[in-house]
Image (cartoon, helix red, strand yellow):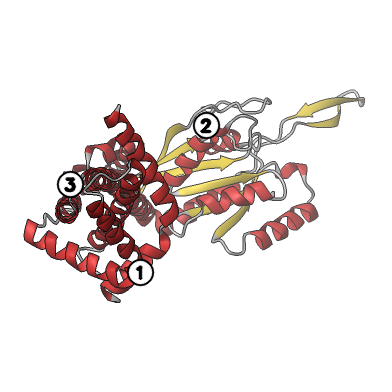
Amino acid sequence: MRQLLKDEKIPASVRAQLKTQYSEVQRMIEKLEKQQIHIVAFGKVSTGKSSILNALAGKHYFSTSPLHGETKRTQPLDWQQVQQQTIVLIDTPGTDEFEGEAREAMAKQAAKQGDIILFVIDGDISSSELIQLNHIATPEKAILLVLNKSDLYQDLDIEKIKASAAKKTAHLNTYWVTCAADPKPVTMIVKDAQGGSQQQTIKPDGDMVALKSAIWHILEQEGKTLSVLNASLFASEVNQQVAESIVQLRKNAATKIIKTHCLAKGIGVACNPVPVADLLLAAGIDVNMIRQLSGLYGLQLNKSDATKLAVTIMTQLALLMGAVWGVNLLSSVLKTLSVGLSTTLTASAQGALGYYATYLVGKIAEQYFAQGNQWGNNGPKVLVKNIVKKLDRNSILQEASEQILGLLKKRKS
């Protein structure tokens, strides 16, 4: 994980883009160094997550309220020491709260980094809760499906809820427990010493036995490995995000390089009245583009190798699209007959073909470099064919013609 933070090959722009993820990696490192196990309470608003954690902690540390959405941020509390590891209880904002998207994202991020998840429900698991559970559940986490407020249900009702939840979560590895973290007060008729009777409200003790037993069982069986596995998984995800960001960064830079050379080719071909010079100009621009693309992918081709690659690509294109290059040659002939004084429209049309040709060369070279300077198992013919098939020739030609025509008119004015 430290290598991920210190890797100097990762561009600064990618680090800035993934600033939050890098901060979380640093927290993961600190968590491992402190030998912490994080128990995260997660669930919809008002299911009693904070009350459960308070009951586990044996004190009123996490804020509770009869109103929805009392918890506004994640809250940690060092709980106990087990096998030289600190057990940290973490409360999270409730999900499915009206206009609570930011707090829900905060809760999901905490759950993503948690080692043991207390997924708290207060009735049969709903479709939205199941979606959330699927989102945060991984083989590296211990998931406790906790039915809170069990004092409000008869035993038969609890069994029905359990059966329904078991069916819906059969594809997941979850533990089922019930608890009553903050039981509802009970009103009883109590006889006094004189033989009379009066009503008395009694606050029952919470029932946390099953939940505590399940937590201790998990800690004894998997405590030392849970945190390491979860940290490794998180680091792998960040690594994947870094790789994807670098790929996208290269794609954006490659597109800019390709379009810059396409426009240079298009204008050069449109303005140059000598056909042979057209061809020389075209080759020089394509080779220069290929060299820049190779540098972007860390390959740094010299002029000779870039020329060979350009020739290979153009040969395959000529075999595949002879008619297109025939039109290009015809345009050159027209310019020769008119001694270079072709109309602006004719010049822009020929320039658009030059633009399109360089666009194809650029896209093919980009794919070649992205594959590690290789054509792939099927060779250059298939790669070239796939690129040509994927691109919309007419829209590229239209865009090229409009850009070139606009620039030619500016030059004349």
Amino acid under disc 3: Lys
Q: How far across and down, in percent of the image, does residue 126 sit?
A: 69, 49
Give the structural element (helix, strand or loop) at label 2.
helix
CB under 8 Å between discs 3 and 2: no
Three-letter code, disc 1: Lys
Whether residue 89 is visible, yes or no, is yes
Residue at left offset 24%, top offset 45%: 257
Answer with the quarter of the image where residue 183 lies: top right
For marks 3 and 2 on the same chain, the one whose residue lies earlier in the sequence: 3
Asked if the residue at tag 3 contacts the one at tag 1, i.e. Cβ–Cβ closer than 8 Å, the answer is no
The alpha-carbon separation of the residues under discs 2 and 1 comes to 46 Å
* Circle 2 residues within 10 Å: few <14, some 14–19, many ≥20: few
- Camera-near label (3 vs 2) is 3
**In screen coordinates, is 29 left or right of 223?**
left
Quadrant position of residue 32 = top left
Residue that label 3 marks: 9
Task: Out of 38 and 178, give the one closest to the viewer.
Answer: 38
Mark 1 burial class by Cα count in 10 Å: few <14, some 14-19, many 20+: some
Which residue is painted at 33% across and 71% down in the image?
Answer: 320
Looking at the picture, how far across and down is residue 36, in whole percent? 35, 43
Residue drawn at point x = 33 percent, y = 45 percent: 348
Residue 307 position (above or below residue 60): below
Density class for disc 3 (Cα within 10 Å; few <14, some 14-19, many ≥20) is: few
Badge 1 element: helix
The residue lying furthest to the bottom in this view is: 378
x, y percent for residue 269? 24, 48
- According to the image, label 1 marks what residue? 385
Instruction: Please report whichever mark, 2 or 1, sits nearer to the chain's N-terminal start.
Output: 2
Q: Callout 3: helix, strand or loop?
A: loop
